[in-house]
Image: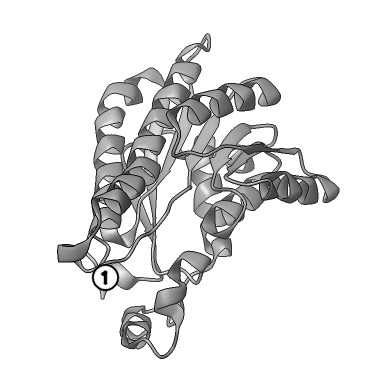
Amino acid sequence: MFHDLFDIAGMKAIVTGGTRGLGYGVAEGLLEAGAKVVIFGTSAKVETVAAAFRSRGFDCHGLKVDVMSHYERMEGFEKAVELLGGLDSLVNAAGIQRRHPCEQFPLEDWNDVIEVNLTAPFELSQLAAREFLKKDTPYGKIINFASMLSFFGGFTVPAYAASKGGVTQFSKGMTNELASRGINVNCIAPGYMDTEMNTALTDPSNPRYKEITDRIPAHRWGTPEDLKGVAIFLSSHASDYINGAVIPVDGGYLVK
């Protein structure tokens, strides 16, 4: 019975941003746990990544989807549901970053970050909710990627901070309307992760690198592997009474 709570074998999931970094780690974790997964990526690399997963015996498809485009999001979602034969879980992991001093931050970069990090996950969450509500007994999991910058303002990243604050708030708002209808909406808030997006920070010559590392009680930056457990939990029946949560996976950064 205990193991059944965490069993996601055969679950049908979409993971955006699944070709690299944290999205890749989550997709891999779900596949290792027996889920069927469609990953979205912005380049032809997505099929190469999906093929590599299939070579390991996993049930994975890759779709080239530019999540900055409303039309590609719509078409990609419909195609993914068709490939999966339904949908049980959506993980919105795709994200971009732009860095400029706040007084010089270009509006074009602001718009791009908001579109990818906030508007895209909101629209995909809407589409997933509609799909879940079609079931005879509505049920489904929406997992959105928040950030440490859902709590803090950061430096030179006002658009990213705004987008990640927005993700937590629309997730809470959707929870108020969907929790009673069998749909869970929750957020993972990764801490400082050693990924491609953070190369500017992980350079040991950057003073922020030591400052951040010294604050993490676990004394290390996180990796995509660190997100597998929480993603499986939030996709499983074990989290059926978890609603509107923002779960930090940060090595203790927030508590120090």
Which percent across, then down, holds residue 218?
Answer: 42, 78
Snapshot quadrant of residue 83: top right
Image check: 174 left or right of 102? right
Q: Is residue 239 visible?
A: yes
Kindly state the secondary structure of the residue where label 1 is placed: helix
Which percent across, then down, holds residue 57?
Answer: 83, 45
- Residue 192, placed above or below residue 82: below
Image check: 64 left or right of 238? right
Which percent across, then down, holds residue 251?
Answer: 41, 71
Q: Nearer the viewer, residue 169 or 68?
A: 68
- Residue 18, placed above or below residue 68: below
Which quadrant would the C terminus be assigned to in this image?
bottom left
The residue at the point 31 percent across, 43 percent down is 167
Q: How many marks?
A: 1
Q: Nearer the viewer, residue 188 or 8?
A: 188
Which percent across, then down, holds residue 225?
Answer: 58, 63
Image check: 63 left or right of 194? right
- The residue that mark 1 highlights is 255
Which quadrant would the N terminus be assigned to in this image?
top right
- Residue extending farthest to the bottom is 205
Image check: 173 left or right of 97? left
Snapshot quadrant of residue 125: top left
- Residue extending farthest to the top is 136
- Density class for disc 1 (Cα within 10 Å; few <14, some 14-19, many ≥20) is few
Mark 1: which amino acid?
Val
Q: Nearer the viewer, residue 232 or 115?
A: 115
The residue at the point 23 percent across, 60 percent down is 105
- Residue 232, placed above or below residue 102: above
